[in-house]
Image (cartoon, coloured by chain):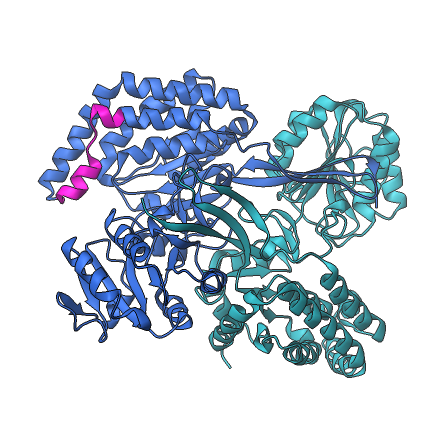
Chain colours: A cyan, B blue
Amino acid sequence: MTVLAQASDARVAAVDLAAATRAEKDAALLLMADRLVERADDIVAANAVDVANARTGGSSEAMIDRLTLTGERVAAMADGLRQLAALNDPVGDVVRGSKLANGLELRQVRVPFGVVGIIYEGRPNVTADAAGICLKSGNSVLLRGSGSAMSSNAAIVSVLRKAVADANLPANAIQLLDASTRDSVKELMRARGLVDVLIPRGGASLIKTVVEESTVPVIETGVGNCHVYVDEGADLEKALGVVLNSKTQRLSTCNTAESLLVHASMVESFLPMVIEELVAAGVTVHGDPRVAGFDGVVPATEEDWGTEYLSADIAVAVVDSLDDALDHIRRYGTGHTEAIVTESVVSARHFAARVDAAAVMINASTRFTDGGEFGFGAEIGISTQKLHARGPMGLPELTSTKYIVTGNGHTR
Amino acid sequence: MTVLAQASDARVAAVDLAAATRAEKDAALLLMADRLVERADDIVAANAVDVANARTGGSSEAMIDRLTLTGERVAAMADGLRQLAALNDPVGDVVRGSKLANGLELRQVRVPFGVVGIIYEGRPNVTADAAGICLKSGNSVLLRGSGSAMSSNAAIVSVLRKAVADANLPANAIQLLDASTRDSVKELMRARGLVDVLIPRGGASLIKTVVEESTVPVIETGVGNCHVYVDEGADLEKALGVVLNSKTQRLSTCNTAESLLVHASMVESFLPMVIEELVAAGVTVHGDPRVAGFDGVVPATEEDWGTEYLSADIAVAVVDSLDDALDHIRRYGTGHTEAIVTESVVSARHFAARVDAAAVMINASTRFTDGGEFGFGAEIGISTQKLHARGPMGLPELTSTKYIVTGNGHTR
């Protein structure tokens, strides 16, 4: 079946799904969860095929870990769906409303997009997550997973579609696209008019390709070259804590800090401390000339400032002022998360107003940019673009709006 | 100067403009308005060159009318800027906010996009409008007007830039792009990273080109194949009024009705009446077989159903049910404005929930889809896409948001 045919089916399903009540959608989510648990053995068996292929193909242990499903992990997927059922349904929420001078009643209400396309990597748990988030927000979803997870994804989607149908919602609201060929990605990117929005999740090169080639509107996610700036007079304890946590709490996420900028006045007091702790934590410090003299620091190249390492590396530069820090971030940042550690309200206000990023952390770890941490209950990704959604995207970000205007024969 | 160089300058200006207060921006808008009035003679003289060229080139009277400036029209442009000064500044508005369980304070605040590109037709008044709306919302603007209005636009932008500079805001926040060549449009569409959003205003083919070729995020505007559906049991007076107003109040706007769908039960009571009045108003009625028998009706072709006439024509079809009307609209509509005339709350609810459009009118003319009518005070266009903005776009639609998270050394 072609992507366009699948997209057409998804579009038909979306009309019914848009009209479904929260109760109907929640019942489907709970049934999807139950069925995943019931069929966990089959899903794990299907996953074993993918894992075996990955081992044969020489995938890294990290990739195999992300690919592997166990009974416990399937149960966690089911729990995710149950949590979605407990969240508010954004569809139908009145965003604004008023009565116009002529008596017309104006309401702007949230409506589903219609059909959402998601392109993602070899993490089969994303299949259930994305399907659930789209269903709860009233959208049909076209899932284009990784070729490495084909067998797992087919098993999961088969279970989910059956559950949706048994809950009297359209099974075609959840569809898996062919992951054996790049053609399905290409077709998806050209399905303007059938697909309302495309969300690429994954590496920088995939995202770049989709952003440049897609005629379907795209929400760009993920690349994060996040900075922590330690201001003049910053509290040393807070600064140490925020830097260490931002860099080392988890290395491979987009909200992990990749660069540290230190005010020149803090070179003697703070730099030795933070370098010692970073090195002790196993982090390689790439320093500019004013940092390179410290033990265990390797010289930074121009490339280091623009690199999203996703590894135990950090680039460290000394800056002469807050504005120099802002200039550095303007040049190398990716608009994801930028943090300042400061005791000065003037600095905090200036930084927050001037830095161009989805999230600004004042005396807090960059790792807090996350739908779960923000209390959204669910997250489909973190947008680094400015159009439509910026930062962690929860259920409301998967909706559009519609104006409903009620009169009594009103004319202009 | 290349578009990329102009975009870079606009980007630098945008940083300062984003930090400008409402008072600073309003002062600039008022000065811009005063200067337009002071320099009206120069602007009208520059416009005369464009008008003479248009006459030589054989432009239609309608096009020449849209192109022509008079002292009165320049004064109206100035008034538009003064009205903008009186509107609320969306920048800094807190969209949502909360205190998280760990004590972190979360605020999502409105921020300008940065640099907005606008491509538009030969209406010089749009130059001042667009410049004002972008300035008020804290955005730099790159204006790519029509070649036919080059001399007028150059005069207007020169006056506006001088006023902005004299008001101590960056003149480079307002820039006119070369309209003598298509290359400037191409460069603008590829200026991803320098331009944050592109808004094409104009004909369907321009919009299609930009949507398909731009790597800069686009907000699609304008094409409106709007329908009025007259339901079973509709009040005849209200139906007549809404149909006539939707079609004839102004012929060339995107919110003008282009198709009329009439429930089969209304063929004898309503159809003769509405056809008579439409014909009397000078409208050519293109009817399906059940309509074609009436006096003055020409047979509709398949093409008629999908046409945005922008002229004194209307396509009329009889449908057997509300759902058939919805199917027709799903097939031929452009997602702009769809109206129902009905006395039934059940029909009104069903139509509003099921029809896929930026605006749904219940017993009201399609002509109400308009930023001014909606009380927004300013409008940069009407979005027919679902991402970011849908329907009339006012000042808030020209902003993005930023999360500001404040802690006291918080870590995960």
Q: Position of residue A346 (x, y in %)?
A: 71, 22
Question: How many numbered circles are shown?
Answer: 0
**In front here: A9 or B160?**
A9
Residue B139, how many percent across, how many down?
48, 33
Answer whether residue B369 is magenta in the image: no
Q: Is residue B71 magenta?
A: yes
Residue at (34, 54) in percent of width and height: B223
Q: Is residue B396 left or right of residue B381?
A: right
- Residue A60 shows in this picture: no
A117 up-or-down from B18: above or below: below
Left or right, A155 with reference to A265: left
Give residue B298's quadrant in the image: bottom left
* Residue A24 x %, y %: 65, 69
Drawn side of residue A20 relative to residue A372, left or right:
left
Residue visible at 77% across and 70% down in the picture: A78
Quadrant of the image occupied by residue B141: top left
Q: Is residue B216 visible?
A: yes
